[in-house]
Amino acid sequence: MSTVALKPSLLHCRRENPKFRLNSKKAKSSSLNYTLKPFSNCRSFCNFKSSASLPIRASSSDTAVVETFESADVLFKETFPLKRIEKVEGKISIRLADGKDQENWKLTVGCNLPGKWVLHWGVNYVDDIGSEWDQPPLEMIPPGSIPIKDYAIETALKKSSATMEGDTFHKVEIDFNINSAIAAINFVLKDEETGSWYQHKGRDFKVPLTDYLHGDGNIVGAKKIWPGPLGQLSNMLLNSEGAHPKGKDRSSDSRDPNQQNRLIEGNCPETAKNLVRIETDLPGDVVLHWGVCKDDNKKWEIPAAPYPAETMLFKKKALRTPLQHKEGGNGSWGSFTVDKEFAGFLFVLKVNESMWLNSMGKDFYIPLSSSTGFHTESRHSQSEGQIKREFSEAEPGSALKSEENAEENQAVSQTAYTDGIISEIRNLVSGISSEKSQKTKSKEAQESILQEIEKLAAEAYSIFRSSVPTFSENAVLEPETLKPPAKITSGTGSGFEILCQGFNWESHKSGRWYMELHEKASELSSLGFTVVWLPPPTESVSPEGYMPKDLYNLNSRYGSIDELKVLVKRFHEVGIRVLGDTVLNHRCAHYKNQNGVWNIFGGRLNWDDRAVVADDPHFQGRGNKSSGDNFHAAPNIDHSQEFVRRDLKEWLCWLRKEIGYDGWRLDFVRGFWGGYVKDYLDATEPYFAVGEYWDSLSYTYGEMDHNQDAHRQRIIDWINATNGTAGAFDVTTKGILHAALERCEYWRLSDQKGKPPGVLGWWPSRAVTFIENHDTGSTQGHWRFPGGKEMQGNQYKIHCRSTVQITKAERDVYAAMIDEKVVMKIGPGYYEPPSGPQRWSLAVEGKDYKNNRTSYI
Amino acid sequence: MEVSVIGSSQAKLGRTDFACGDVGLCNNLSAKIFCRKSKICFDQRIRWPEASVRFTIKAAAPTEAVVSEKVSGGKTTSSRRSKRIDGVRLYVGLPMDAVSDCNTINHARAIASGLKALKLLGVDGVELPVWWGIAEKQSMGKYEWSGYLALAEMVQKLGLKLHVSLCFHASKDPKIQLPQWVSRIAESQPSLFFTDQSGQLYKECLSLAVDDLPVLDGKTPIQVYKEFCESFKSSFLSFMDSTITGISVGLGPDGELRYPSHHHPAKSNVPGVGEFQCYDKNLLSHLKRHAQAIGNPLWGLSGPHDAPNYDQFPNSNNFFKEHGGSWETAYGDFFLSWYSSHLISHGDRLLSLASSTFSDTPVTLAGKVPLMHSWYRTRSHASELTSGFYNTVNRDGYEGVAEMFGRNSCKMILPGMDLSDEHQSQEALSSPESLLAQITTACRKHGVEICGQNSSVAGVPRGFEQIKKNLLGENAVIDMFTYQRMGAYFFSPEHFSSFTEFVRNLNQPELHGDDVPKDEEEAAESLCSDPGKDLHMQAA
C-alpha cells in the first residue's frame, strides 16, 4: 500500500486571467483540476507535477466567489515507490455547484484514472477547532456509503456516463445544504484495487465552504487585492535596532505596489529580555500563532506571561495573538517580550480559518540568543534575499495542523526537513559573506555546515551499516514449517509447532531411511523442531510411498514396521511429535476385475469396486461420485461408503496405537470432502493434523493475480469442512511468496485489507506455512522456491497467532510488525522500524532480510 | 487569495538583486556556494578575507546564479567546470549495488543523505557502476534502466556530476552476476570463460578470446556490448550534457584491462605470481596458429609448462626465475608478446567501440588499467606478465597500452593511488609507486590523461596522505580522482572524518590558488595535514 502524496504547484494561469474571478457572479461552476502524473514504469522514481488551478467559485444571491489557494512550489520532485506498472496520468476534478436550489448545493468529485476509486471523506463544522474530521450529517451521505468509525465516510465513485477526453470518468456527487454549518469538506481518494491513496501534498484535499457561503463581501473584496502569499512574503526583512536605525522601507522593494513588507525586529536591550517586533503588510486580521523554544530542536513551548493583549492559549501548545492594525495603512504589527533563556521565537501566521502562512512548510524561526545573534543583527540585504527564498514555499496548510495530522507523508516531511537545512545553511553562508563581524560568523557557519555534514553522514552510516549482509547458511534439512497457534484442540496442536518434513523424494533410495533418521533425531530436536513428518509408511507401488496398496503392511522402502516403531519412540524421547503421512484419497488395487481393470483390493482391507468412486472411467468404480477432485493414477476411494470409512478409521487408530503416531499429514485432500476428514480426525484424536490442499493459484494472462482470495477460500473451505479440526498447508502463501521474491514484487505480500494474502491472513491458526516439500522442491522440483531466497521465505513465516501489522508492502520491500514485538522486513528495499517507546535491536539479518526485536525502555 | 507563481517570484528576486548592488553580490555568493565545490571551507585556519574577495570576483552573472540554484544547480556548473583546468575533480564511488537486481535503488535514503553530505563537503561528483547483469538481465536486448535513471536523477537534483562505469563483468561481493541469459549460454560453452592451466574457469567475465566470435545467440560479445552502450546512450541522453561527465567501459575482470591471473583466493598475505589464463579452446588454437605462422609449431602446443602456480613466488619454478628464467628466452618473448598483444587488442576493440558510440556526446571516455605492483622489483615482473602486461626489466609494457588509450582518446583510470612502497610487504618485492610512475610516464608521452582511484574499500595505512601526494605533488598529472567507495565503512565515524579532512586539504590550495603565493599555500597545507590524527583514524 503506498501513500501517494501530491504536491501541486500552482501555475500561472490564475494570475493571467484575474477577470475570470471578478466576473464570476453568474458562473455556475468551475473546477479544480489536479493532474496526477505518476510515472512508474517499474521505476521507483517519479515526478509529480501537479498543477492546481484555483478553485471554486459559487454563486449565491448576494455574495459570491471565492478562491482557495494552493501553495506554490518549485517543480516538486520526490521519490515514490509505486507499484503500478503502467504510466498513469489523470485528473481529479472537484466541482462545487448549486444543485436544485440555492440552499442545496452539490459537490462533485471526479477522477478519470482507471481504478476502483473510493472517496474517503469527512467534514469540518463551523466552530470546529483543529482539523479533525467529523461525520457529515445524514442527509449528506450518498446511498451505498460506508461509515468509517466516527469521522469519515467512504463512498465509491461511480462510472459516469459522461466521459472526459475519451476516458471513463468516475465521479461521486454529494449533496449538501448550505445551512448545515459545514465549514469544509475534506477528502482523499483511495484506489481500492491498488490500495493507493491520493492525497494532496500528504494531506487531505479540503474544500472550504464557509468562506463562500458565509463570508461577506468585504472580505472577498479585500482578498481580491491580494497578490498572493508569495508576493506578500517575498520581502521579509530582518531588522535590528542595535545595528541600524529602525526602518522598514526598502527602496528596492517599493517598486511593486502590491508587495508588502514585513519587518521583524529583534531588540536586545540590557535587560534579560528580548523584544520581538513583528510587522506585516498583510491586510485584514492576522493572528500570530506563536511560541518559543529553548534550543535548536525548535520544540514549541509557551513562555511565561505577560503576553500582549488578547492573547489566547491554544491547546497548551502555542499562543495566539491578533496583530494590531497599523495606523492608517495596510498591515498590522505586534511586539512580544521573550525571556533571554529562550533561544528562539517560533511562529506561523494565521490569516483566516483556512489559511496559514509558514516558512517552507516549517515554522518561522527567529533566533534570539546572542550566540546566534547575527540573524537579528544583520540588517544586510542578503538576508533579505535569503528570507525571500525561504518563503517561496509558503504553505497554506499549517505546520501546526500537521501535528494533528498523523498521516503526514514521510517523504514530504523529509524533503521539507532537508530543504530547511539547506536554507539554514544558506542563511549561515550569507552570514559569512557579510562584511560585519566576519570572523565569528564564518566560524559559526563552518561549524554548522560541518555539523550538518556529520549528521547526514551519520544517517547514511546507520542505514548502510544496518543493511550489510551477514548471511549465514542455515543447516535445515528440509522445509521447516511454522505452525500456527490455537487452543489445544484436537488436530491443531499448540500453535507453536515447527514441523520438519523428515524425508525427501529420494529418501527411499537408502533403503534404511528410518535408521538414518533415527541418528538425526536429537539433532532435529536441537534445531528447534517440535514435529516431524515421516514418509508414508505403507506398502506402495511407487517407492516413495504415495501409491499405497495394502494399508496394514508397513514394510516400505524406508524400512520395516519395527524400525518405524523404534524411530517413533526415539522421536518421542527427544521431544518431537511424529506425523504419519496417510494417503486416504486413493489406493492401488491388488486384482483386476472382470474387465481387466485394477479395482479389486486385497490384504486385510479387501474391498471391492464399490470402494472406488464412480466418476473416474479408468477404474470403473461402483461407488458414488467423488466428493472432490480425482487423482488419476490410481483408484480413488469412495469415502461416502460406510464400510470404507469404518475401515479407514480402524486403520488410523491402529496406526496411532501400534506405531505411536501423534498426528497426520493427509495427502491430496482435494480428492474428498473435508467432512470425512473430520470424521477420521474425531475418531483418531490426533495431536496435530495438516492437509495437503494443493491446486493452482489464479493467473491472468500469465501474470499472477494479486488477489488470491479464491484460492485461499478453497483451502479455508476445506478446513471449514473439517470443522477446523485440521490445518492445511498454506499453498497460497507459498505461491505468492514465489512471485514476490522471484520478481521483486513485495507488494503482493499484503492483501487488499492490508493483511497477509494467504490462508495466513484469514485463518492463521490453521495455516501451515511452508517453503518447500517433497513435491515442490527436492528432486521433483514441480514448483521450486526461488533459489537463494529461502531465508527471506523463512523470515516471512510469521508466527501467526500473533497480530500481524503490515507496515509496508511495496515493490521492493515488505515489512511487518508482529505482536508489536518483532519487526521484520524482506526485500532489497529499505525499511526501518518506527521509533517510539520500543527500542529495536537487530536479531537476525541476511541478504535481503532483517528481523528486529524490541525491548521496551 | 491567490498564490503567486514561482517563476514570477524568481524574476522578482532577480530584479531586486539588480536594484541593489550589494544584494546582488551577496545573493549570488550564496548561490554559488551551492553550485560550486569547495567554496565552503571548514578549516578555521583559513583566512576568509581572501576567500571572500575571490567570491566577489567570480560573482559575475547574478541572475544566472540565482536561477541555477533554484532550478537545478547543475547547468551553470558544468560549463564552468569544463573550463577549469587547474585542480583535481573529486568523485566518490556509489555503492556497487546501488541499484538492486530488481532495478530499485538500494538504501535510497542512505544514498540521498550521503549525496547531500558529499555535496556540502564540496565533492564534485559520484561514480556509478552500471551492471550488464542488472540492466540487461533477462534477455538479450531487453534493457531496464529505470533504477539507474532514478539514481542519475537523484544525483542531478543535487547538482553533482556523474561518472558512469559500464560493468561487463560480475562481482562476488556484493553478488552481481552476469546477465542470466549469458550464464545460460555459457553453461554449455565453457570456452566463453578464461581458463587456467588446470582447467579452472573464471566465470566473472567473458574471455577476451570470444570478443569477435558469434557465441551469444549469433552475436559477438562486442556487438552485444555495443548495443548495450547504444541503449545506455539513448536512455541517458538527457543527462549527457550536464550530469554525466564521463563514462568508463569495462575491459575485463573487475572492469580492468587484464587477464584474471590472480582470481584464486590468496592463501597468504603475499600475493603469488598468478597464472596465465590462456587455456580456453579459442586462445589455445590461436596460440597454435600463431606458433605455426612464425615457424615454430612446437611453441604453440600449450602455455608455458614451467610457470608457477597462483600462490607461488617467481623463483619457485623456472619461468620467472630472476636470472635465466624462461621469460628471457626466445620462447618466453614469443609467448609473452602474444599473450600481451591479445590483451591490448581486446582493450582497443572495446575502447574504439565506446568512442564510436559516444563520439557525438560531450562525455569523456575512460578505461581502467590495473596496478599489478607485486614483484615489480624483480627483473621479470611476474605478476604483470601473468596479467597480460609484458613489462620486464628489458621492456616497457605500458607504452603499447598508453598508445592504445591515446589512439582512442580515452583517459586511463589508475587505481592504487593510496599505496605507498613502505607499507607494502617486503617479501613481495612490490613497488606501487614506481609502477605508477612508469605508467604515468607512458601516459604523458602519449597524451593520455589519468584519473586516479584508490585501491580498495578498506583503509590503507596513510592512504590519504599518499593520495594527496599523488594528486598535488609537483609531477601530478591527475585531473580527476574517484574515491572508492560509499558504504557503511565510508560513512563510519572513524573513516568519514578522515575523509572530510582529506577533502578539505585537497580543496584548500585551490581556494587560495588565485590569491596566495605558492609558498604560503604549501605552508597552509602542511598546517592542515595532521599526521598524528590520520594515524589515529587508521588505527581505529
Image (spheres, rainbow, N blue to C red):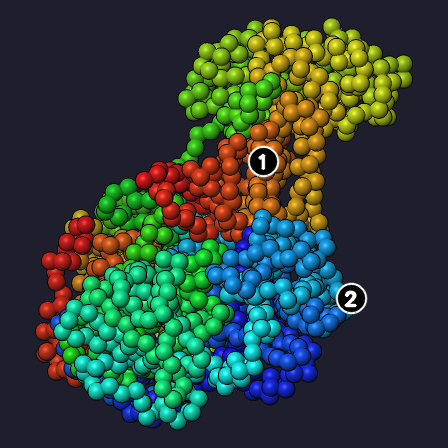
Residue under the image location 53 percent in, 71 percent down:
A8
* Pair 2/1: label in front: 2
x, y percent for residue B320? 26, 51
Q: Is residue A619 above or below residue B347?
A: above
Q: How many neighbours does mark 1 have within 10 angstroms: few (below 14), some (14-19), or many (20 or more)?
A: many
- Quarter occupied by residue A65: bottom right
| Type of amino acid under label 1 | Leu
Residue placed most toward the observer, A277 or B197: A277
Say which element carries label 2: strand
The residue indicated by pointer 1 is A760
Residue under the image location 45 percent in, 57 percent down:
A404
Can residue B304 be seen in this snapshot?
A: no
Q: Chain of mark 1?
A: A
Can residue B536 be seen in this snapshot?
A: yes
| Type of amino acid under label 2 | Ser
Q: Is residue A59 above or below residue B262?
A: below
Say which element carries label 1: helix
Q: Chain of mark 2?
A: A
Residue under the image location 23 percent in, 45 percent down:
B269
x, y percent for residue A198? 57, 61
Residue under the image location 77 percent in, 13 percent down:
A644
Q: Which mark is residue A772?
A: none
The residue indicated by pointer 2 is A161
